[in-house]
Image: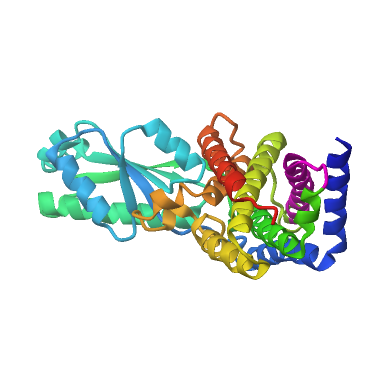
Amino acid sequence: MKSYIQLTLAQLRLFARNRQVLFFTLFMPLFFMIMLGSFLGNGNDISLNGVVIDQDQSAESRVMVEALQANQVLKLMPAEDLNAALEQLKHGDQKLVVVIQKNYGSAVAKKGLDSSKASFLQVYYDQTNQMNSLIGLQAVERVADGVSKSITNYVPIVQIEPLGVQALQLRYIDFLVPGILAMMIMSNNLNGVAGQIASWRERGVLRRMQSTPLKASTFIAAQITARLVLNTLQAMIVLLVGSLIFGTQVNGSWLLLLLFVVLGTLTFMSIGFIIAGVAKTPESAGPIAGFISFPLLFLGGVFFSVSNMPEFLQPIVKSIPITQLSTALRQVMNVGAGLGDLWLEALLLSIWLVVSFIIATFTFKWE
């Protein structure tokens, strides 16, 4: 225990003395956050993604679904559960929910002979985002009008019924801060561990440690503890700056947020140990770590939503640890999600942690 405490304190002193590295590991995330937040922080995502729910399941309703999905402004995916879709709308995950009601087909078949039988499309939209809502409603109305004209020779029998839903008022900066936090955790641990361990191995520091009664588990535990302390302090600084400058807040549990900070730190530390074991020199450790971490910045939902990426790429992107970490942090901070909502993200991060740790135990070398 005494060796563990001394090694932990020694590692923290090394962090404190290396002020240049400490400055840039904290400065760069803050720089990205302040610059992007200043220019784009109050902007809204204008991608009109949503779902269409066909409750009628008739030939006429399928024509309407096809027309809605063919519209270039709208990005509507088929769904069945209205309550789940409305929850997604409230959380900002969807912009529109279009519902084709039952008996739509029989009403359309009357071809407008009775105006009281006009068929309504229910369009649920976000009341807090007037610009997106207006564009979305106009787009759906144009599609409905086009279908109506093709059926009845310009007799409007298909109308829309706008239904406002109070959703979370999220800005881009609210999306960005959790992503910056995830980026910092990944960079500090994946790149930092790989470079430091490879450097110590080349300088013979690890070999001298091996010649002492020090156990490898004690050495690794001290490294983990020191980096957990450092990451927690840096996370608090990022959250504090985001709150003071941009008014961001944590709507969920601070304890759950800390849990994912710890999970992310351990996961990327394990990957960093793998890189340090594979790299023969400190000079090669840096490029290997950069080759892995750089693409993850753009694929892991740090700066841009994963839902805006190509569909064929999304299953791959959603399986990588940075995506799970940024999603979990964002859900806790913005939506106030609990562990029951984020069990899948916690499970996937834990799997990455266990697998990476096992691989790291085989690749780690003292010399």
Any magenta on residue 326?
A: no
Q: Is residue 81 above or below residue 149?
A: above
Quadrant of the drawing holding the C terminus: bottom right
Q: Is residue 146 above or below residue 64?
A: below
Please report the bounds of the magenta region as a residue range. Answer: 212-241
**Residue in view at x 26 percent, y 52 percent:** 69
Q: Percent from the top left, x then y, of residue 309? A: 41, 58
Dividing the picture into quadrants, the one containing residue 283 is bottom right
> Is residue 174 at least partly visible in the picture?
no
Q: Which is nearer the eye, 349 or 359?
A: 359
> Is residue 141 at least partly visible in the picture?
yes
Residue sitting farthest toward the top: 340
Q: Percent from the top left, x then y, of residue 100? A: 26, 38
Kindly report the secondary structure that dominates the magenta region of the rendered protein: helix
Q: Is residue 278 above or below residue 54?
A: below
Asked whether, in this view, residue 203 is left or right of residue 60, the answer is: right
Asked whether, in this view, residue 309 is left or right of residue 105, the answer is: right
Asked whether, in this view, residue 208 is left or right of residue 144, the answer is: right
Any magenta on residue 219?
A: yes
Q: Percent from the top left, x then y, of residue 92? A: 50, 46
Asked whether, in this view, residue 60 is left or right of residue 174, the answer is: left
**Residue in view at x 62 percent, y 37 percent:** 336
Dividing the picture into quadrants, the one containing residue 275 is bottom right
Q: Percent from the top left, x then y, of residue 24? A: 75, 66
